Structures are given as structure tokens and as C-alpha cells.
Amino acid sequence: MSSKKDVSVRRNFLKKTLIAGSVVGGAVTSKIALAQNSESNFLVVDPWTKTQGSGFINPPYGLPSKYEKNVVRVLPNPVPTFPTGSRTPLQSLHGIITPNGLVFERHHAGIPDINPDQHRLVIHGMVDRPMIFTMEDIVRFPSESRIYFLECSGNSAAELKKATGKTAQEIHGLLSCCEWTGVRLSTILQECGVQSSAKWALAEGADGAAMTRSIPMSKMMDDALLVYAQNGEMLRAEQGYPLRLFLPGFEGNMSIKWLRRIKLGDAPWQTREETSAYTDLLPDGKAEQFTFAMDVKSVITQPSGMMKLKLKGFYEISGVAWSGNGKIRSVEVSTDGGKFWSQAILQEPVMDKSLVRFRFPWVWDGAPAVLMSRAVDASGDVQPTMDALLKAKGANIFYHNNAIQPWRVAANGEITNDR
Ligand SMILES: Nc1nc2c(c(=O)[nH]1)N[C@H]1C(S)=C(S)[C@@H](COP(=O)(O)O)O[C@H]1N2
Ligand SMILES: [Mo]
């Protein structure tokens, strides 16, 4: 929680140097602090500077500082008998990349233990040359690395009914953004000779759930990736080791992990995950199928739910925005519950179907406030309020909640979910 930390650092600084008078317009001016204090007093040599540091880190695979031990994925509350998902601590992250140990997980039958030497990918159906690939075969193809977000279409779902979560992690933590490395599906499919009658592909996982989804060939031949690495290292077991499908911008469920089979056909297969689940129930009771792309969305992560503003004055409001339809065009921030909106600064690079970090300078005057962010994507879609979303989609919807998240700042600085 950077803002929390920043605030307490600032506070200690104030205490140490007794320069309460140097808080100008809410910001601490260190120049004045130095002038009023002798440098020897200010530049104290701490104990860790006086001794030799520790040698090589053990275990050899590095871990975060022990002081960051609370920055972890969380399980749903109450924890189910068999956990099927964990959430990314969005409020503790900076920039756009989710470190591998904090990437949310969603698995329908646990994490299989797959030996990469024994793993195979079968491609069959409407192809001229059905083929079986080993992992060695796959990594020999030309590859690419791209930064994309991944969001479960059930992210933030509980909030559609009422406020349930307290933190950004609890509410919106089925969201991650990694650099994914792999082979374009189009490269491998061309190797097998795609028949002109092929309109859909079936992707199947090797886990106990044998997760299967139908995917339009247009997506498979566009930016779909056969992924074997995330953030520079091989996939984590929970993210689909040794091979997963990755469909940029599409609902997370379709990016089949532990991928073992792709079959080409001329119609969708109507699998369990596209009939009994992952459909959108409309007001008339009919279910809409195959709503693939995740709509434009954003959330303020700093400051956010369960944090406390300890001082009046300057804060950088920051958060992430994303759209399954392409790039983010702009993000606006409101500090008065949506009456007045101002443009936030987008951190470059702004990439296609990636998280974008936005920043907005704010001076808190100590009065109650409601912080909101509203993203617009390149297609012109605007992130809706919860009321507008429920009006447009009906009260039956469960998936695809992309509504604006309001955070209420109380006069004592405490921040709560204002759904
Ligand atoms: N084989 C398989 N693939 C799967 C799943 C699964 O249970 N089995 N879960 C899906 C769901 S619902 C989501 S949201 C994403 C989550 O990916 P992650 O665990 O890497 O975050 O994987 C998808 N792919
Ligand atoms: Mo999901």
C-alpha cells in the first residue's frame, strides 16, 4: 500500500525533524527541512550500513523482502473446502505488471502436475495434416512476447447484487497483466493446413476439469498465442504449465490452461462452459452466449478500500484501466462522486489489451469525498456506472461487471467500498 507507506514515511520524517511548518500546500518540502537541521543530524548512519550484508540469498530463487510478507494472493472468504481461485492484491502493486507469485488463479479441478517431457498438443479436425507436438517442437517455432491483461469474466460479480468486498483485491482481484511468451496459433495452425470450412476451434485442457471452449477461427488466426512463459520464466503450474492458450482481451475462461488439444470444426461445440456457465442471462430469461471480449473498465487502486489517509494534503490517485476491445483512450477521475470529472495522466506505453496505469494529482482538504475512475477505450466505449450497467443488461447478469468503482473517503480518512 504505497500511499499508506508514503504517508507514514512522511509522518516519521515530520516527527524526526520537527518541521511541521514546512508543510506547504500539503506537500513536504525537504529543502527547508535540511536548512533547519544540521546534515549530521539528518543523515543518521543506520545499523544496517555499519555491518556486512547477508551473502547469497537462500533459497536461490529470490523472494520479496520479509517486510512485504502481507502482499499475497487471497482466497475467497469464507474459504471453500476446495479452493478454486485466489485474487491478486491490486492495491499493493505498482505499474502494470503482475509478479508471477501474485497472479490470480482460477481452476475448476485443481492444478495438475504435468511433466513437460510427457506433455503433448494434438491438433486435428478440419486440418490437412493432423499433428502431435511435444514441448520441444513448440519452442522451436518463431515466438513473440506481448503484455496483455487477463480477467476472469466473473471478476467483481458479487458486487452486481450488493457491496460485498472491502478491498480492490477482494472486489476486482481476478485480474492480472503479464508479459506472455509463446507462438502465434496461426503459425502452428498453418503448419497443419487449415481447411476453408473450419470456422471454430475447440480447445481442451489436460486438467481434471478437461476445460473446453469453442473459439472463432478469426481469433485463432489473429492474435491468439500458444503460451509457455510468463514474465520471462516458464509458466507457473497454476497458470497452465507447460502450455496454455492465450486469447488477448477475451474472458479469462477461454484461455485454456494445460492445453492438450485443438480441434477445428465448422460450428461451436456447446460445451458445459458455454451453456451452463459463462453466458449472460438477459432480463427476458434468455441467455446470451459467446460474449467474448471483456469490456472497458478501470479501478483506483491507490488509495482504495481499507486504506486510511492519515494527513490532509497531496495524494497521487492511481489505478489501472483496460479493455478487451483494444487500447485505452482516456481515463477520467472524479473526487466528488461523479459530479465533476478531470482527465488522468496515462502512463506510457499505452498498449493494446494491456493494463494501463493512470495517475491523478489530488489535494485532500479533509472533507468527505468519493473517488471514482471512468475509462474510455479506443472504440469509444465508456465505462458505465453500476446503475447504467444494470439498466442496460438487466438485474440477472452475473458475469462481465465493468461498472465504475466508487471509494468513499470519510472525514477521518478511512476509505470504504461505496457500491
Ligand atoms: N484447463 C483449464 N483452463 C482454464 C481454467 C481451468 O479450470 N482449467 N480456468 C479458466 C478460468 S475460469 C480463468 S479466469 C483463467 C484463469 O487463468 P489464471 O489461473 O492463469 O489466472 O483460466 C481459464 N483456463
Ligand atoms: Mo474465470
Image (tube, helix red, strand yellow):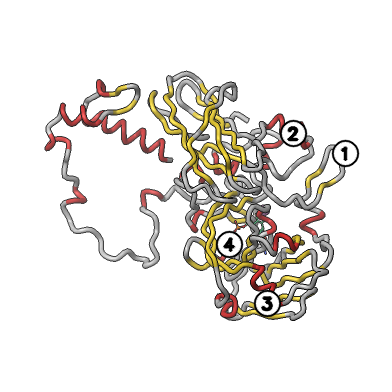
* Closer to viewer: mark 1 or mark 3: 3
Between the C-alphas of marks 1 and 3, the distance is 45 Å
Disc 3: CA contacts within 10 A as few (<14), some (14-19) or many (>=20): some
Asked whether, in this view, residue 128 is left or right of residue 67, the answer is right
Above or below 309: residue 393: below
Q: Which label number is shown at residue 390?
A: 2
User: Answer yes or no: do the residues labelled 2 and 1 have beta carbons within 8 Å?
Assistant: no
The residue carrying mark 1 is 284
Q: Residue at x 54, y 25 (%)?
A: 370
* Neighbours of disc 2 within 10 Å: few (<14), some (14-19), many (20+): some
Can residue 213 be seen by looking at this rendering? Answer: no
Q: Nearer the viewer, residue 44 or 143?
A: 143
Locate residue 172 relative to residue 413 in the image: left or right: right
Amino acid type for the residue under numbered disc 4 = Gln
* 140 or 44, nearer to the observer: 140
Mark 2 and mark 1: Cα distance apart in space = 14 Å
Q: What residue do we see at 48% from left, 66% from top?
A: 233
Secondary element at tag 3: helix
Q: Who comes first in sequence, dot 1 or dot 3?
A: 3
Q: Quadrant of residue 214?
A: bottom right
Q: Is mark 4 within 8 Å of ligand 1?
A: yes
- Kindly report which numbered mark, 3 or 2, lies closer to the viewer in this rendering: 3
Nearer mark to the viewer, of 2 and 4: 2
Who comes first in sequence, dot 3 or dot 2? Answer: 3
Q: CA gap, disc 4 to disc 1? A: 37 Å
> Type of residue at label 3?
Glu
- Report x, y in % for residue 283: 84, 37
Residue nearest the viewer, comparing 248 with 57: 248
Q: Amino acid at mark 1?
A: Asp
Real-space Cα separation, disc 4 to disc 3, in angstroms: 26 Å
Residue bearing the label numbered 4 = 239
